[in-house]
Amino acid sequence: MDLHARIPQTTDAATFVARLTEDTPHDRDVLLVRGDPTFLRVGTTPSRDIQLPETLSYLRAGDIVRVNEGAGHIRVVYRRNSPHNVLFFTERCNSRCLMCSQPPREIEDGYLIDEILEAIPLMSQETPELYITGGEPTLLGDRLLEVIEATKRHLPDTSLHMLSNGRLFRYMRLAQEIAEIRHPNFMIGIPLYSDIASKHDFVVQAKGAFDETVRGIMNLARVGQRIETRFVIHRQTFSRLAHTARFIAGNLPFVDQVALMGLEMTGLTKANLEALWIDPIEYQPELREAVEEFRRARVPVMIYNHQLCLLDKDLWPIARKSISDWKNVYMPECISCRIKDQCGGFFASAHLRYSKHITPVGGPAMP
């Protein structure tokens, strides 16, 4: 599934965010006309048609797009029936993680927030969850607060999950400002890649980041903000996985949940692949020990981005189908697997490297 596509360029430099409808368009709606070809009908008197490429044939009423006719570009901002809608804030970041899936760029991209604020009122009230990501969203300061407030106002029943490196929450004021919005279902996911400061700092390529992150987590806890800690498992981190679990259980037991995550083979991971790749089968002892540490401390723990056939069966109940649907694939080895529908599968980039131990499970499907 492609979220970006080319469209015919026009001499007009019209750029707009709109919700698609297959019925009578209302304000901020664009008519989606199915056929061969499928096109968007913009305006009424006079109207103009924008032909959609085949890669966007999955679009449906209620989806939201950003159209730039002058540049000949269309981007899908939101899909009504997807559980994986992401609000991409910025490409800027104050870390440069070895395995970053979105390599940071120091550019001015504040227009992205303008588009997000345009799109939020058009989203379905039944949207189950939205994800905020980047780059580092906290670099946006007051504009981040605007988006959180907008989601609370327009989507009061939608949970909001933000991914952040947590470093700027070392400033209590930012933590307090977010808490004061009182979003009813907001969680911040923050990575902690080791219990040893120098190792975490090496992974994120930022000196002092460990201390800033831990201080940020503690500040968020002080203001009552819900927190998830994340740990991406790869060759540079796996040996400290159980130790980090003990550190979190002993020093940050107030976190709401922990996510232990598999590696995505994209972005900077591709450049650092030989230093990062490890067959998940090799770190299963460390993974099992970490899970036991969290269970003993009664800290909720989940496993993301892993294939069930590589996990012990007693870990299956905490394994989640966490990969966004638009980049989730399965390998040829999975075709005959009885539990394929319950398995998280692979990132689309996994063709670069994946375990030689992927094996179809032949027993009964999971309940």
Image: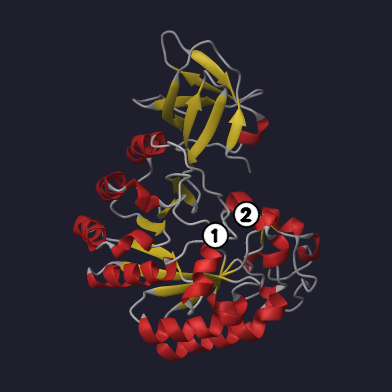
Q: Please provide percent x and percent y for residue 114.
A: 35, 35
Residue 307 in the image, given as x and y percentages of width and height? 67, 70
Q: Classify mark 2: residues with Cα within 10 Å, few (<14), some (14-19) or many (20+).
A: some
Question: Callout 2, which amino acid?
Answer: Leu
Which one is in front, 88 or 336?
88
Q: Which mark is residue 97?
A: 1
Q: Amino acid at mark 1?
A: Cys
Position of residue 208 in the picture relative to residue 342 (left or right): left
Label 2 residue SS: helix
Question: 61 and 90: which one is in front?
Answer: 90
User: Furthest-left residue in view?
Assistant: 180
Quarter of the rendering containing residue 116: top left
- Identify the residue at horizontal 65%, vertical 58% (top origin): 269
Q: Rate crowding at label 1 as few (under 14), some (14 to 19) or many (20 or more) other CA atoms within 10 Å.
A: many
Tell me the CA gap for discs 1 and 2. Answer: 8 Å
Q: Quadrant of the C terminus?
A: bottom right
Q: Is residue 185 above or below residue 235?
A: above
N-term mark: 1 or 2? 1
Relative to 363, say whether 179 is above or below. Answer: above
The quadrant where residue 351 appears: bottom right
Query: Taking 58 as reference, is 163 above or below it?
Result: below
Q: Residue at x 32, y 39 (%)?
A: 121
Q: Is residue 70 toward the left or the right of residue 330 in the image?
A: left
Left or right, 278 with reference to 154: right
Which image quarter: residue 89?
A: top left
Residue 179 on image: x %, y %: 23, 61
Residue at position x 48%, y 82% in the image: 245
> On the image, numbered disc 2 is attached to which residue?
268
> Are the residues flagged by discs 1 and 2 in contact, CB closer than 8 Å?
yes
